[in-house]
């Protein structure tokens, strides 16, 4: 077997992204450079022959996936697994964490204007976010950030591939002040009530629907 065939077989059989060094363990003759070359060769062949799949880099690994433009055809089949979806409030909270990380729960609530305890817990359970430290503030509140699985789930190589959100980054997060201290300007917030926050898993997002 040549290296390209071995790499293709490993990617085809894997249900999760694999790093080049992990793929290289398949054969003593393989190394990371050969794996990278094989992946480029495979994608060139797939593109030239107009195949319905491609090898994509997700986070720090590679995975063989159906091309996104074939998703509408796959949605008609119940036997093809689909990623579970998040509600609008859950996606909004996840976006804030992704762009402003590391960030505390109180800071997320300052931006959103509503309580996010339940949504944050759900995102942690779904392994999309994780505790990544403690803030240097009274009570040492937890800091949250996105995970490696977040990148894989949304088909991203890294956080630098997130769509631009300059307006979100410009929002000033006001820290709590002592009673009677009105020296800081109050940040305008959306005062909506998110009843849906208690049920974050709804069909209301634009997640990556690539199917293997």
Image (tube, rainbow, N blue to C red):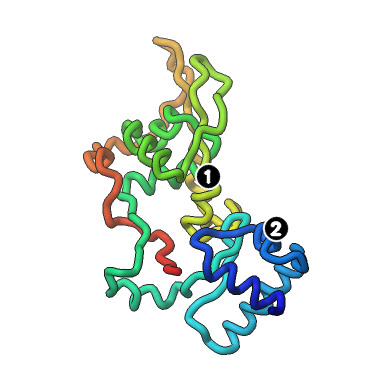
Report the residue that reaches farthest toward the bottom. 49
Q: In the shown orientation, is residue 80 left or right of residue 129?
A: left
Of the 4 image quadrants, the one containing the C terminus is bottom left
* Residue at screen point 44% across, 67% down: 210
Outermost residue, left side? 195
Residue 78 point in image, percent of width and height = 27, 69
Would you identify the image quadrant in which residue 190 lies? Answer: top left
Earlier in the chain: of badge 2 and badge 1, it is: 2
In percent of width and height, residue 196 lies at 24, 43
**Residue 67, percent across and down?**
48, 74
Foreground residue among 20 and 96: 20
Left or right: 32, with 156 as reference point? right
Q: Quadrant of residue 189?
A: top left
Mark seen at residue 28: none
Q: How many marks?
A: 2
User: Which quadrant is home to the N terminus?
Assistant: bottom right
Q: Quadrant of residue 180?
A: top left
- Residue drawn at x 75%, y 70% is 34
Residue holding disc 2: 21
Q: Which mark, by number, is residue 147?
A: 1
Front one among 18 and 121:
18
Instruction: Between residue 187 and residue 156, name the one nearer to us.
Output: 156
Where residue 208 appears, as percent x and y from the top left, is 43, 62
Q: Whole-Å distance between the Cαs marked 2 and 1?
A: 20 Å
- Characterize the local packing of mark 1: few (<14), some (14-19) or many (20 or more) Cα atoms within 10 angstroms: some
């Amino acid at each position: 077997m040549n290296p390209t065939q071995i790499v293709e077989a490993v990617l085809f059989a894997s249900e999760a992204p694999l790093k080049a060094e992990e793929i290289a363990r398949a054969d003593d003759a393989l190394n990371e450079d050969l794996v990278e070359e094989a992946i480029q060769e495979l994608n060139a062949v797939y593109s030239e022959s107009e195949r319905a799949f491609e090898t994509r880099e997700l986070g720090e690994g590679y995975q063989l996936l159906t091309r996104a433009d074939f998703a509408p055809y796959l949605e008609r089949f119940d036997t093809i697994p689909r990623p579970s979806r998040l509600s609008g409030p859950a996606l909004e909270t996840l976006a804030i964490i992704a762009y402003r990380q590391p960030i505390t729960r109180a800071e997320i609530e300052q931006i959103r204007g509503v309580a996010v305890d339940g949504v944050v817990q759900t995102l942690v359970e779904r392994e999309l976010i994780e505790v990544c430290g403690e803030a240097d503030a009274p009570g040492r509140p937890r800091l949250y950030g996105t995970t490696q699985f977040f990148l894989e789930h949304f088909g991203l190589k890294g956080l630098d591939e997130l769509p631009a959100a300059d307006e979100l980054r410009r929002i000033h997060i006001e820290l709590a002040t002592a009673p009677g201290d009105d020296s800081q300007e109050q940040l305008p917030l959306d005062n909506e009530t998110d009843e849906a926050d208690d049920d974050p898993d709804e069909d209301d997002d634009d997640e990556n629907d690539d199917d293997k």
